[in-house]
Amino acid sequence: MPEGAKTSGRIEMLDTLGVTLPIVQAPMAGVSTPALAAAVSNAGGLGSIGIGATDPSGARKMIEDCLLYTSPSPRDS
């Protein structure tokens, strides 16, 4: 494998995900709140919310809250 291959692949992955840090916060039901996911996302990582154990209206509320707490992405412009 060429010297810079790992680095360029990692940067390519970060660009694809739209994040600046190689941090993925696990979507764990009960502890992965919208505020936590937004904090991780706003810091440059990939924040996730755990909605698997929630009903559709609860999931919708968590998604809306997450969108409220996150900063607009440069991709949104």
Image: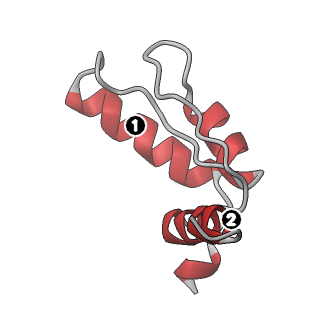
Q: What crowding class fits label 1: few (fewer than 14 Cα within 10 Å), some (14-19), or many (20 or more)?
A: few
Answer above or below: position of 13 versus 67.
Answer: below
Q: Which residue is mark 2?
A: 7
Q: Residue at x 69, y 42 (%)?
A: 40
Answer above or below: position of 17 versus 22.
Answer: below
Tag 2 secondary structure: helix
Across and down, in percent, residue 75 comes to: 55, 80
Report the amino acid beneath label 2.
Thr
Q: Which residue is mark 1?
A: 61
Quarter holding the N terminus is bottom right
Across and down, in percent, residue 76 comes to: 54, 79
Residue furthest out toward the left: 56
Quarter holding the C terminus is bottom right
Across and down, in percent, residue 32 comes to: 54, 24
Pointer 1 with pointer 2, Cβ within 8 A:
no
Number of the front mark, 1 or 2 = 2
Name the side, left or right, on which 51 lies relative to 39. Answer: left
